[in-house]
Image: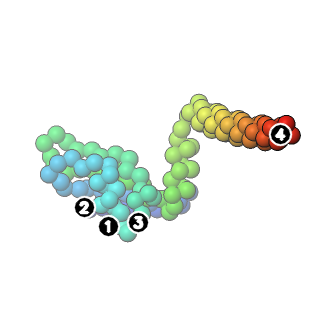
Amino acid sequence: MEVKKDIKNELFKRRELEIVLEEKSNPSFVDIQKKVSEKFKIPEENIQVLNIGNSFGRQIFDISVHIYDSKQKLDEIKNLSKTKKARKEEKTAREEESKKAKEAKDAEKTASVEKKENKEESASIK
């Protein structure tokens, strides 16, 4: 594994790497993440593999990788790259989930109140 470019991007709090890797078969994004993690002693969750490219028949791969300072920064950048429509859909999905959870909680409360009332009625009848 040879590093061709290593640029520190202070705005996005990341290192931008261009790597050349010689392998017998196509490496996967997960394999690249592991190798970069081992080489730079950084957690895999802070690494984003952007591109793995090569020419047909060659065993040399050109790889683009971003290494973020923290997992939160990586998540922020991924969220920015989403379209406005995708962010809106996620927001509505979260709101629906919270609404359903609240309704379920309210249903449990009413069920427990009804049980309590039924117990009181049966006790007063005896």
Where residue 86 appears, as percent x and y from the top left, is 56, 33
Q: Which residue is mark 2?
A: 1
Label 4 – label 3 distance at C-alpha:
71 Å
User: How many neighbours does mark 4 have within 10 angstroms: few (below 14), some (14-19), or many (20 or more)?
Assistant: few
Where residue 114 appears, as percent x and y from the top left, is 77, 36
Local secondary structure at mark 2: loop
Local secondary structure at mark 1: helix
Q: Amino acid at mark 1?
A: Lys
Tell me where residue 72 sits by quadrant: bottom right
Q: Which residue is mark 4?
A: 126
Residue 6 numbered mark, or none: none
Mark 1–mark 2 contact, CB under 8 Å?
yes
Where residue 90 appears, as percent x and y from the top left, is 59, 36
The image quadrant where one finds the N terminus is bottom left
Q: Is residue 85 visible?
A: yes
Where residue 35 appears, as percent x and y from the top left, is 30, 60
Label 4 – label 2 distance at C-alpha:
83 Å
Q: Residue at the location (19% across, 55% down)?
A: 22
Residue 39 numbered mark, or none: 1
Q: Amino acid at mark 2?
A: Met
Local secondary structure at mark 4: loop
Mark 3–mark 1 contact, CB under 8 Å?
no
Q: Residue at the location (36% across, 67% down)?
A: 40
Residue 42 numbered mark, or none: 3
Q: Amino acid at mark 3?
A: Ile
Q: Nearer the viewer, residue 48 or 95?
A: 95
Q: Residue at the location (86% across, 40% down)?
A: 124
Tell me where residue 45 sits by quadrant: bottom left
